[in-house]
Amino acid sequence: MEQEKKASAQDDETVIPKKRPLNVVFIGHVDAGKSTIGGQILFLSGQVDDRTIQKYEKEAKDKSRESWYMAYIMDTNEEERDKGITVEVGRARFETETTRFTILDAPGHKSYVPNMISGASQADIGVLVISARKGEFETGFEKGGQTSEHVLLAKTLGVTKLLIAVNKMDEPTVNWSKERYDKIVEKMTPFLNSSGYKKKDVQFLPISGLLGSNLKTRVDKSVCPWWNGPCLFEALDAVEVPPRDPNGPFRMPIIDKFKDMGTVVMGKVESGTVREGDSLLVMPNKAIFTAGYKAVLHIHSVVEECEIVNNMICIEKFNDFSQLGRFTLRTEGKTVAVGKVTDLPTVGENA
């Protein structure tokens, strides 16, 4: 009888596969619609009810921002709602039949690029949101906007797969125009290629974050007769990312911590497996220093001024742990260099 129960339990585990976890960062120029898309995804996946949406609609109307109510689902603090821009990395979760997603809503304003880097460093895949509205795509991509810098940073931080969501296709200046969509694809493709993204690593699709078109279900042919590709949910489910090694040494860059009946840390497991009762070694990660500032070093979840040479940070060789072996140098609000850690001094060597 006990053997039958064990066999039944094993069968149940076989019948009900575990969903894969996947972190998705939404990146792109300010006002491209990232937070609105994130909010719409949560609404369509049943994470937000109608009453909450009605509350946000009223709140947005009171602030004379009627079309931004969906963004309020992701932008939760008053500063973000008053300014109409994302400041901190928003986090939320939703599930499909095969995948358990964590949304990371990165800020698009150039003043908050360090926060965007923090979000991208936690991601497995990225969704680059581009506004199709006349003038907005050009501002974000061609005139020193954040579209190009976000792409470069995402690649440097280990985001190897990109979905490019051409948003605001419902705008009167666009009206689901295939010509406008194709023009954006034509301009973006060479840049993505030069940034290190191969054709197989990127996928374009048209959407409307405000209306929810082509997000959970494919856009109606009466609205967009020329689109025969997947919706965003289908594209996300189909993305394949390199698996992490569950048998390797445990590595988890700590992103945040808070106290609730003890200290709780939050991070992304890059390698290995952790179980209750395991003993872990926590290595130092100090805050940013200001003395002698010349540039800021970003590597996985660590941010350090590169002139400081006497302070320890946790890094790995790129060939050993690619996610922990990339770095970015920024100064005066611009990315000036990206690189990989090719070698490290051994114990006893002078740094």
Image: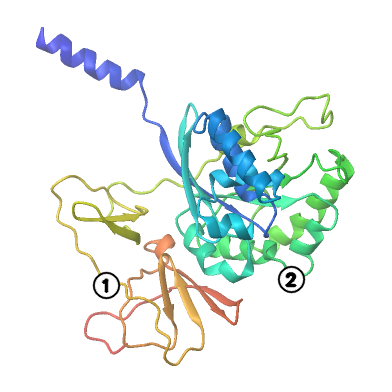
Front residue (pair 166, 250): 166
Q: Are marks 2 and 1 in contact (CB under 8 Å)?
A: no
Instruction: Give the residue number, with chain letter if any, for mark 2.
Output: 144
User: Disc 1 on helix, strand or loop?
Assistant: loop
The percent coordinates of residue 138 (x first, y second) are 81, 61
Q: Is residue 187 visible?
A: yes
Whether 314 is drawn above or below 189: the answer is below
The percent coordinates of residue 316 (x first, y second) are 36, 68
Q: Which label sits on residue 329?
A: none
Q: Is residue 16 left or right of residue 233?
A: left
Q: Is residue 196 visible?
A: no
Q: Residue at x 48, y 36 (%)?
A: 94
Rendered image quadrant of residue 291: bottom left
Q: Is residue 65 left or right of residue 51?
A: right
Front residue (pair 279, 66): 66
The percent coordinates of residue 166 (x first, y second) are 73, 46
Instruction: Give the residue number, with chain letter if any, for mark 1.
Output: 284
Q: Residue at x 44, y 84 (%)?
A: 306
Q: Residues within 10 Å of mark 1 (few under 14, many from 20)?
A: few
Of all residues, the one furthest to the left in this rendering is 2
Q: Residue at x 68, y 44 (%)?
A: 61
Of all residues, the one furthest to the bottom in this rendering is 292
Q: Quadrant of the C terminus?
A: bottom left
